[in-house]
Amino acid sequence: MRFFTGLGVLLLLGVGGAGGLWWTWGRDLPSVSDLDVLEFSGQTRVYDRQGTFVGTLTPSLGSGASENRHLLKLGEVSPWLQKAIVTSEDRRFYEHHGVDYIGIARGLIKGVLKNDLEGGSSITQQVVKNTLLSDLHSARTAERKFKEAVLAYQLERNFNKDQILNAYLNVIYWGNGGRSDIIGAETAARAYFKKSASELNLAESVYLTTIVPAPNRRYKNFEAYRPLMKNLLARMVEDGRVTQAEAEAAWKTPIYPAGWRIAWKGDGTVTSARLERPERIRENIAASDQAQGVNRYQYLHYMQAVERELLPKIGRKALYGGGKIYTSMDLKAQQAAEKASLNAQLPGGATLGAALVSPRNGEVLALVGQKLVGGRPSDWNNATQARRQVGSSIKPLLYTLALEKGWKQSDTVLDSPLTGSYQPQNYDRRWTGRFVTMRYALDHSLNLPTVRIGQEVGMDDFGAKLRELGLTPPPDAGLSLSIGTLEASPLQMAAAYAAFANGGLYYAPSLVRRMEDARGQVLYARSAPAGKRVWDARAAWLGLDMIRGVVNDLTPAQGGLATKAQIPGWDVGGKTGTTNDVKDLWFAGVTPMVVGAVWVGKQGGGSLPSWAYSGDVPTPVWQQAVAGALAGQPRQTFLEPPGIGYKVVRQVNMAFRQEQLGEEQLAHDGTRRDSGGGGLFGRRSNPAPTPEPEPVPQPSAQQPGTAQQPAPDSEGPDLGGPDSEGPDSAGVSAGGVSAGGLNPAQDQATPVQVDPTPDTSTPEAAPGAAVEDAGQEVPSTAASQPSTPADAGQGSPDPSVLPPETPEPEPLPTPVPLGGTEVQPEDPQPLPEPEPENAGGADDSTVPGAASQDGGGEQDPPPAF
């Protein structure tokens, strides 16, 4: 009786455990019917926004992160290859029902007794793993194994063995083909033997089968893995799939995989084998692509994005079953973006992603997911799928939030290190200790004033605003979010920036307008795009005015960060961005008709060369793509809302809310004001201070033709100074002296009183960092004086030092603002060339908030620019 009671308990526990697994992992499984795509190839036609035919959708089967669009039916694959694959990969394939429990047990016993472990996954399971569960990759987790077994059983019930084997032959990974992986039998046959899969003989089929477990390694060592061919031929004889005579003939048949020079004896012995040209594999793939048409990969990433948008809505059978898809693609914009990618001058090993959208409704005009070089690009679409830290391209969103809260772009912010454990730095590891205007801080992409703006505005509010703009800020990012630890795709950044160009509305990006089936019945129709207001119209205009300043305020000689974005005849605004160790380069920009973003970096992560600047690498790509999209269009301007006025401040014509034109500049230092309520940071109520600095000894005589320049926060223009993008270090050296080994005796500056009446409240701290009151007096010891700018002594103003007698400055060029009038410059004073841009965001491999190398409470913030 006890035995039966115990057995019943075990059965109940087993049923309960299975039910628990199903409840946890089995309720949301993909449909196995998605694999039934071969009969629909090439029947669905795709059109752009003008009704121009752009191509057909070709069904694909995935293999991990790659896809195969050279799908073959079983009759198009050599029967020798089919037999070799079954014997090698799943000898009981035609006997089991998806999971080969006997094969698993046999493989384990063989591994224990003979140290010859066989794989336990059946062909059916491998089809599931490489297609329906490709998002789980090859993780050996209980969840994947459970789902794999359930779906393998369902697959066996819905498809016959030949269909499953056919699917497997179309998704096998056969090695690295250069720009794309070698996926499927057809690509493998053409890559290794320059022939179609149907033409493979037994010897070639056995060779391709033996390299499947580790193709990249086994291809490079022919002689070492040659015995595996004999072993596989012997097993095929055992299984009755070939005769002994056929096996012996195959062993003696000379084969020559791509790139190999092999000498053979008549009995099948290899006398010598040398890999001379491994690049022949890529050449064979390229030749095959060329033979099938040079334009077959045009618009590939846009077409793939269309598939991804429609698949969840209508399913594979409807998508590939014929009909017409009308998209929002602008064919001219798409061609311009692809040409810009082809022409892009990138550092070695780098690729890119680019997205263009319409600011009027969020429709996606163009997508390019890789650096194009001719031939088939990688399937991975960096324009939509990648999530990379955005660096300083996030700054305009924070500045506009401050403007929406009532700040003015003429208001000043302290450029000085924070107190506490979180210690971001400016690009050149220097600081002036003075108040600079918001416009100046954004033009020069200064980190310290930006973080202080984040303190006052409030990071909770900033995170909420980013979410309204379709972005996903990391949880508990703290102050580092203000300078770019956000991860986003180019398409997301383009959609967020579009709100600057359309008066403050956010539109979710969309690619498909409508799809009809082969009979003309509408399968899907997108509703009219509805914009969500994220900025009030005047705040959006003020933010637009600031990013137009980034592009236009400074000339190349003055170190303008984004001058290469200018498009003759068009209003352009935008912002560059760079992350730590130059891992990511960005430019996001706007025009009245097209908004776009471009990312450049290494596909697998890693640093780019230190000479790679965001103003020089992604910005020209953006400019060529957008200029091409606008070519031939009548010039349009941004629509200025009512209630905007202009005023020249420090020789820069700035936009203001009409009622703020007469207000004084206000100074901000990031100090919390409890009266702000709700955890927000209130604005400083005192006018921007102009503290009297102590004079610094000057040379007795000046060089002919030189003149002293005023500090940017005194009477001089708010232009010039060091303005290239560079590293944003995790910590500061004592008192803010540059980490470059500067002589303190030469780099001292006058102590600056931050606030005549310091506030004792505490600014918002980054997670894990106790940020102290940033409004206290800077220590006056020599070791803690602000350093002079990197170009001191070369004609650039030193914002922290005023000589006893300051001559009138020569005016510098001033851009034409939106709706404003141009201030004619006189002889501009040239400024030094920009320094390398070296930094910014937190390392991709770390989590924002982790301790930095100098013991700070957060990971290094993202790029300065």
Image (tube, rainbow, N blue to C red):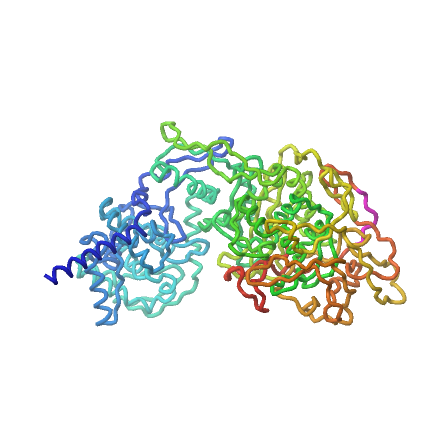
Question: Magenta stretch: residue 827 in it?
Answer: yes
Compared with 413, 105 (above or below) is below
In the rendered structure, the answer to whether residue 659 lies left or right of residue 328 reads right
Question: Residue 622 colored magenta?
Answer: no
x and y, in percent, of residue 34 in the image: 32, 43
Q: Which of 193 and 91 is in front in this view?
A: 91
> Which residue is outermost to the right?
700
Q: How many labels does the image show?
A: 0
Q: What stretch is highlighted in magenta?
A: 823-829
* Residue 555 shows in this picture: no
Q: Give the residue drawn at x 76%, y 61%.
A: 753
Q: Is residue 278 left or right of residue 478?
A: left
Q: Quadrant of the C terminus?
A: bottom right
Q: Main secondary structure of the magenta part?
A: loop
> Is residue 457 visible in the rendered structure shown here?
yes
Q: Nearer the viewer, residue 421 or 704?
A: 421
Residue 115, compared with residue 144, is above or below; it is below
Question: Depth check: 845 or 10 in front?
Answer: 10
Residue at the farthest top position: 520
Percent x, y of residue 543: 66, 44
Residue 799 lies, in percent from the top left, at 77, 59
The image position of residue 389, as x and y in percent, is 54, 54
